[in-house]
Each structure stands twice: as C-alpha cells, then as structure tokens.
Image: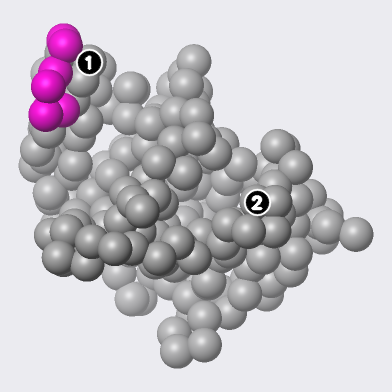
Amino acid sequence: MRPKFIFVIALMAVLFQGCIVKSLHPFYKPENVVFRKGLLDNWTDQDGNKWSIRRHKLLPNAYEMHWLQNGDKDVVFLAYLFDLEGELYFDFMPLTDNQDSNLPIFELHLMPTHSVAKLVKLNNEEVQIKWFNEEWLKKLFEQNRIRIAHEAIMDENPKDEDDKWYVLTAPTEELQKFILKYGHDATAFSNDNSVWLTLKKSV
C-alpha cells in the first residue's frame, strides 16, 4: 500500500489536475484566523465528489474537510480560514486518509506541506476556492521577478526542467506579504492547469 501522505498528494493531483503553491510554514497567523459557520455542511464539487466540512473537534477555529469518492475513500484536510486586509484565504494541510500503510518507517520521513487558496465566493448554496498556481510562480522565479525563500526539488529521475516542484521556505510574515502583493493578480490563479474548487450544497 502507498504511504498515506503520498496517497493524499496523488489524490490531490487527480482531484485538482493542476499544481498548487506549497510551503513548509503556514500562511496564517493566529490573529488572522476567522470562522464562517456557513461553510459547515455537505457539498458536491464540480466533478461530483462529496465534501463534508466540519468544525475540528480539538481546534475550534479550524475546519476538518473530508473528501469522499465512491464511498470508500475519505481524505481529510485541516483548513484554517484567515483574513488579510478584508480578503479571505484558506490554509490547507493534508491530515490523513483511510488507506492503511505497511511502510510506517517511510511515513516517518514524510512532511506534509501547506497550500494557500483564495475564498472567491461563499453563500448559502455555493463555495468557490482558487489556489495560487505553481506554474505561475515558476515563471516568476525563472524571470527573476520575485524573491522569496524557496527550494526547487527535482524528481528522482528528471527528464527536463519541468520535472521539479517548488516549496516555499519563507516564514509566515513573508508569505503574507506574498499573498497581499499577488492576491488581486488574476494571473496568479488562472492557467491551463489552474486549481479551483466549486462546491454546491448537497441535497
């Protein structure tokens, strides 16, 4: 069986069919965190998959978001909603899935990362979330248009320069400056492989 974290990342790739901006550190500070009860419900995404958004039992201002597929896959994300200058963003981190792992020692060497997404729409019937796009960020790095601490990680057997992905290593304060600078830039969220999620309330 695959390790849980690898399974979560692989599932996210299938679910979103795109690349997201990842960070070792959270994008939020405790004082930025807000809670919207309107998110607590059962939802269906644009691909017909089920989402259950609940209040985290131990972290009262956090969301526990379950992604369910075919009734046998339950991937869980920890999500914090936070406010930066009147705009709402999500910090996502994978928690677990329902796949048992036979390689616990391998799991001990894995580290989940944070991703950041903008809450574009929230009403009684619909939620829309858009992630910052990694391909957009990659172009900024290649063109020397941005300076933020990061690591570029290559695949084990890379075929070309596209076989690498980025992890931001900057502290939260710098990550928030990044969000404030680019949060209103439409190109940060729109690309051929952009990552977005539209949830409709389940009936």
The structure's colour scheme is one colour
| Residue 141 can be seen in this image | no
Q: In which quarter of the image is residue 45?
A: top right
- Majority secondary structure in the magenta region: loop
Residue 43 coordinates in the image, percent (x, y): 74, 57
Q: Please provide percent x and percent y for residue 16.
A: 52, 36
**Relative image position of residue 147 (x, y in whole percent):** 11, 32
User: Marks 2/1: CA distance?
Assistant: 30 Å
* 175 vs 192, nearest the viewer: 192
Give the side of residue 164 with respect to residue 182, left or right: left
Give yes or no for contact between labels 2 and 1 (Cβ–Cβ under 8 Å): no
Q: Residues within 10 Å of mark 2 (few under 14, many from 20)?
A: few
Which numbered dot is residue 154? none
In the displayed image of the protein, which residue is found farthest to the bottom?
58
In the image as oriented, which residue stretches furthest toward the right? 203
2 or 1: mark nearer the eye: 2
Identify which residue is drawn at 22% across, 67% down.
104
Work out whether residue 101 or residue 180 is closer to the camera in this orientation and state it.
Answer: 101
Residue 195 placed where, x, y %?
A: 50, 33
Tell me, yes or no, whether the highlighted magenta stretch contains residue 105. Answer: no
Asked which secondary structure carries label 1, the reply is loop
- For mark 1, what is the residue? 162
Instruction: Rate crowding at label 1 as few (under 14), some (14 to 19) or many (20 or more) other CA atoms within 10 Å.
Output: few
Q: Name the residue under label 2.
A: 69
Q: In this rendering, would 99 be left or right of 155?
A: right
Q: What element carries label 2?
A: strand
